[in-house]
Amino acid sequence: MATVAIVTLGCPKNQVDSEAIASILEESGYELVSDSAQADFVIVNTCGFIRPAREESLAELKALAASRRPGQRLIAAGCLAELNPSLLMQAVPGLDALLSTRRWHEVGNLLAELGGPRPSPVARLGDSSTPTRRASRRPTGATAYIKIADGCDGPCAFCTIPRIKGPYVSRPRAEIVAEAGELVATGCKELILIAQDTTGYGRERGERDALPGLIETVLEEAPAPRWLRLMYAYPQHVSDRLLEVMAARPQVCHYLDLPLQHAHAEVLRRMRRPADADDILSLIGRARAAMPDLVLRTAFIVGYPGESEAEFEYLLEFLREVRFDHVGAFAYSREEGTPAGEMEPQVPEEIKTQRRDRLLEVQQQVSLERNRAQLGRELAVLVEGAGDGVSVGRTYRDAPEVDGLALLVGEREPGEMVPCRVARATEYDLFMEPLDGVPRARGSRRRSPRRRRAGGDDGRGGACRLAG
């Protein structure tokens, strides 16, 4: 039986694709292994969103190419394969195949083609001539992402995602509901709905404000998860109806990710983003009124072309006023082929870095105060792993990988929901006191490894948080 190792870089949407690829290959008779050195085929699901992500993807591919054994096949899949296949072929000697973001469902046929030596890589790029089939998934851990749409129609001047992913296409509602039910049946406690813009769900089909109805259908027709979380909510499309559904349904986490990118109107206009900060403040006010325990995450780009010191100071003041729980901060990355890449003046790299650090310094104090406000509060912790007498997990306040952690004494089973009280807080993490009185589990179970996310740095998050 041929063996396959899959290395996933980038955002949760890549993770969803990798899980589907793994399922297709297992159904086709391949064995999935975790050690790439032992695999007959190694698939790297790359990220190509911004320069640091591309550099990490290239470094991973080059390292695997340099260390691979005779007969082993190396495949570059995902965003970078779609965005710049010629770069991959030039930079990675001996690359065997390219598989784009829009044709991952052809992976079984691709691997079947890779028998014997080939003079050049096999390339499956661009749009597929056959529709994408829905593959079952076998996620690891108690959390699973559900991609409700793919592609993007956004006009953002800094972004390459529309070129990589193509136009926005929503998945059929029945397909999403079926996938949710399957994932919960496998033991998933938390489902996370994702897309480049989750609030855009159904719009290209003429459906207005379809996300609230999708949430209700998932919770009514699928076996209900303990938590249902939304990510990447485009602020202009967060409706009062969506806030009502989030507030009324106990499984829906009171957590909203609004990737704003900036706050100053002139910078937002240059970004081709919604430019009215008053509308954002109004939305945040309505959301917090509907859910007083709401957690807000956002992401900002600093050093965007033409950003003045006054515009940056305005952003800092906005940060102090709104008091987000979690913030990703990214120095602008100049991307070839985007309108922003041609803008002048470009901000010097050292100023970008200084501004990112200044923003994070302001936010760390805000985050510390927001976390300390949780002291004494009783919250459930979803355990993700344990070892050395400590369990590590998250409360509803934290999304996987990009936000903080919840730590408690005693080793619990991964996937267990533990009632706790917040005993201590730092800028990012909460230290919890278990309330159930259950004795500590025996043995040592290390925390499950998380996938590697390429790109930027907010102290917790990664580059693809900019999307949306």
Image (spheres, rainbow, N blue to C red):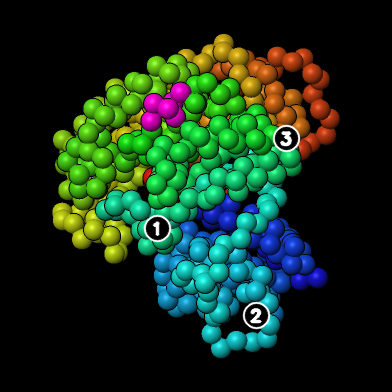
Instruction: State whether residue 405 is above or below residue 115.
Output: above
Mark 1 is surrounded, within 10 Å at the Cα level, by few (under 14), some (14 to 19) or many (20 or more) other residues, namely some
Amino acid type shown at disc 3: Pro
| SS at badge 3 | loop
Instruction: Tell whether 203 sits left or right of 445.
Output: left
Q: Which mark is residue 309?
A: none
Q: What residue did someone put label 2 on? A: 113
Q: What residue did someone put label 1 on? A: 167
Per the model, the C-alpha gap separating discs 1 and 2 is 29 Å
Question: In the picture, residue 134 is in which quadrant?
Answer: bottom right
| SS at badge 2 | helix
Sequence order check, earlier mark of 3 and 2: 2
- Residue 204: x %, y % from top left: 40, 50
Sequence order check, earlier mark of 1 and 3: 1
Nearer to us: label 3 or label 2:
2
- On the question of residue 59 being in view, the answer is no
Nearer to us: label 1 or label 2:
1
Q: Is residue 388 magenta?
A: no
- On the question of residue 111 being in view, the answer is yes
Sequence order check, earlier mark of 1 and 2: 2
In the image, 445 versus 284, the foreground residue is: 284
Per the model, the C-alpha gap separating discs 3 and 2 is 39 Å
| SS at badge 1 | loop
